[in-house]
Amino acid sequence: MLGIWILHPDSIAFIIKDIVIKGWGGYALWFIPVLFSTEIVYFFICKYIDIKYLRFLVLLCSAIIGYITYKLDFYNNYNICFVFTSVLFYGIGNLLSDWMKNLFCNLNMSILIQYTFALFLCSLFFLLNHQKPEFFINKLSGIYTYIAAFSGAFFMCSVSSIVSRLHYQPIRIMKEGIKYMGRNSYIILAFHQIILQLLGLTCLFSGSIQRLIMWFSLIMLIEGINRYFPFVLGKKKMLPLLLE
């Protein structure tokens, strides 16, 4: 709220009312309530359905409902309709995680690189849609979006597997940095855009300096939340810290 007041001091009451009723809009924070709702929905799917194949079927039905809400332009405050689609990606990732780990670990490097390149090409399928997907307003654009999204997710897993097999010191440092960002992506997603907008109001720094300040601010937030308020992230104990 402090950030909103600084950004829009003359219309704070209207903006807060609009956010409470409609959600955060196009800012990156739209993803937070969607992810929260997705985790709750998938929790109940797992709680009441023990058979994996039935879980796959429920996820498929959810995706169909999500596509229908997009085509019919359903009322969509807080982008809640996108939960039907996001639970598909969340659930498939959970159900296939062990299979993907075994697949990528057992492939030799040359085949893995070819596989990675093929996945990258498939991730470009979204370009075949008649318009660009916009997830923050539940705009899926077309069936190619699903192919591109899954290919992109598998592509990142494949790249991760390649990097994990490299043991040069610079690569090891890069891996630790990626792991740190991955563990704390929730905080990064929630705050990076607000910090950049606040810095943009100052007009004191160039774009590159603003981003350096943003990352420094994010690291301070990450360390503070993980050290003193891990319950905010639904954690009972601290995540591994950088500043120790």
Image (tube, rainbow, N blue to C red):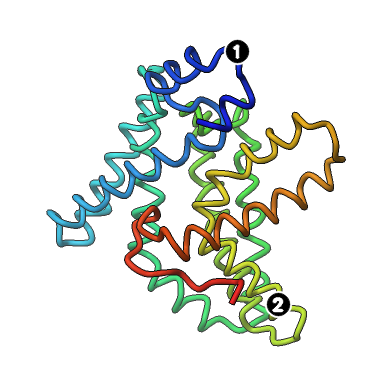
Q: Is residue 189 left or right of residue 37?
A: right
Alpha carbons under labels 2 and 1: distance apart: 46 Å
Residue in the picture at 38% in, 73% down: 98
Label 1 belongs to which residue?
10
Say above or below: 205 vs 231. Answer: above
**In the displayed structure image, the side of residue 67 where residue 176 appears, left or right:** right
Q: Nearer the viewer, mark 2 or mark 1?
A: 1
Q: Position of residue 180 (x, y in %)?
A: 58, 67
Q: Secondary structure at mark 2?
A: helix
In the displayed structure, 189 sits above or below 98; it is above
Q: Position of residue 67 (x, y in %)?
A: 39, 30
Quadrant (top left/top right/bottom left/bottom right) for the C terminus? bottom right
**Image-quadrant location for residue 108:** bottom right
Q: Secondary structure at mark 1?
A: loop
Q: Which residue is mark 2?
A: 173
Q: Amino acid at mark 1?
A: Asp
Mark 2 nearby-residue class (10 Å; few <14, some 14–19, many ≥20): few
Give the residue type at disc 2: Ile
Q: Nearer the viewer, residue 147 or 178?
A: 178
Pointer 1: residues within 10 angstroms few (<14), some, or many (20+)? few
Give the percent coordinates (x, y) of residue 41.
Answer: 26, 45
Of 87 and 65, nearer the camera is 87
Residue in view at x 37 percent, y 18 percent: 21
Q: Quadrant of residue 4?
A: top right
Relative to 75, 189 lies left or right: right
